[in-house]
Amino acid sequence: MIRTADQYRDSIRDGRRVWINGERVADVTRHPMFRPLVDIRARIYEMQHLPETREVMTWRDETGDEQAVGVKLPYTQADWHAKRAATDAVLEDIGGVVTRVGDETVGEMWSLFDGQDVLNEVDPQFSANIRTHIERVVRTDPFHVSANTDPKGDRSLRPQDQDPDMLLHVVRETDAGIVVRGAKYETAAAYANQAFTKPTIANWGNAELSDYAVGFICDLGSPNLKFICRTGFAGRAPAEDYPLANRFDEVDTLLIFDDVLIPWENVLFYRHTRAATFIRATLHRYSAFAFVQRNLKVADMMIGAALFNARQTGLDKQQAVQEKLAQLACYREGINAHLTAAIATAERSPAGLLMPNQSLLFTGRVFACSQLHAMMHIARELVGGQICVTPDAAAFRDAETAPWLEKFYSINERWRSEDRRRLLAFARDLLNSDYAGHRLTFQLFAQSPPFAHLAAVYRNFDWDEPLRFVAKSAQLSEQVRK
């Protein structure tokens, strides 16, 4: 049965030890900096039950039970079209962009599902564990996230040559499971149910075995976990002035593993460096799709804010303005083309799943992330300088100042001062605020750093075809062609 919103909220009231702004949080579902995102995740569960959204959000398995589309294993192009439609339905419903809600992270487990041959080299039980966990996710639809990057420390040194806890590692084995120590950064961990925890991009040496080469499913209600969160943007300033920061800030956590027991049934690989290398190389072969899809919606938001402003002020007929709008449109459609083509030319995975065309998906991710800052600047130019000088909403309501702001912010009978203020506040929060800067960095690094984005392109691009064509055109010898 698909979870309800109340079941989700109850599941994270488990006594977990969460801090934010130096405060111990008693209930993350009620805290003002966590509640907006908890409510959004709860809304997704609600959408899976509501008559008007149930069809796009769910599917029926062979037994007739309804399951969530986002966590369904993809076997056909129709599965990917359904996932894309469900994500669009969520973003449309909430009126903004959130990334860490489960569909973008559960795909990382599918990559390990593809690597069962590698897991079998270590221990056949590990491949059985990944199958069990994927089935459990499909059946129970937990809020699943992905604990990824570590504090790292001095990266010129091997982890074992400095404080060993800088990278998460196994400190001992017990009959019940492994005990791990270290830390991970994870967006949304404080209000999620479980995390796929695995090695970061790190040098653990050339040894075949390493205590740092470990991957597991962590129950985020486990004893000895500590959640130290960065301060949230929600509540810092009025929602009327910062409508995105107050609704869509996904709070990031330094997740401390203080000798946390991971039961053997939750261990997906352990000590085998080949398994760790495999998962790092293939981690995003599915999840990158949902990640890049969010960039598409961000592009829509930038286009909408810029075009409304141009039309408000009567500048949309100028050629220079149209050219900049066209640049935004090219960016948007470039992302759309990569996503659409990745499904249209999807490839069968080693485990029989259908994965988006890897070269198109990863080049699309590079395109979306590497150009985002430039597109934000174009949108700033089109919106204009008033996003950094406009008074706050309270001034528009004050008896003494409101008449002046009504005078200077009303453009015509259609665009009165309140709509003008709302648009400028939205654009400021999208492009110029602390939240906007945070999201720009998040989109750049949230899946992996830029060099890893390009490394994924290098691994998945078909280099043989350009070589073949040039060899033929240049009439190179057979020796060179080989």
Image (cartoon, grey):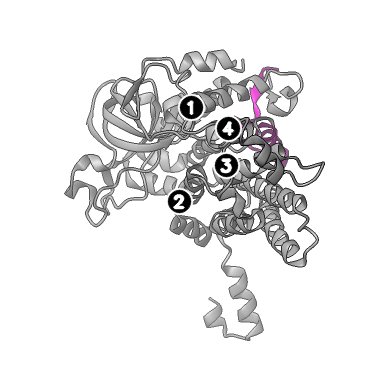
Q: Which residues are magenta?
A: 64-92
In this rendering, the label closer to the viewer, 4 or 1: 4
Task: State the separation of the CA atoms marked 4 and 1.
Answer: 51 Å
206 relative to 234, above or below: below
151 relative to 189, above or below: below
Tags 4 and 1 touching, CB below 8 Å: no
Tag shown at residue 391 = 3
- Residue 217 image offset from top left, x and y in percent: 41, 29
Secondary structure of the residue carrying numbered label 3 = loop
Main secondary structure along the magenta-highlighted residues: helix
Q: Earlier in the sequence, mark 3 or mark 1?
A: 1
Task: State the separation of the CA atoms marked 2 and 4.
Answer: 51 Å
Q: Earlier in the sequence, mark 3 or mark 2?
A: 2
Tags 1 and 2 touching, CB below 8 Å: no
Left or right: 429 in relation to 12: right
323 relative to 117, above or below: below
Instruction: Indicate the quadrant where residue 390 lies.
Output: top right
Secondary structure of the residue carrying numbered label 2 = helix
Tags 2 and 4 touching, CB below 8 Å: no
Note whether residue 92 is visible: yes
Q: Residue at label 1? A: 133
Q: Quadrant of the N terminus?
A: top right
The amino acid beneath tag 2 is Ala
The amino acid beneath tag 3 is Pro
Q: Residue at label 2? A: 281
Give the class, few, some or many, for how many residues have Cα within 10 Å of label 1's Cα (few <14, many ≥20). Answer: some
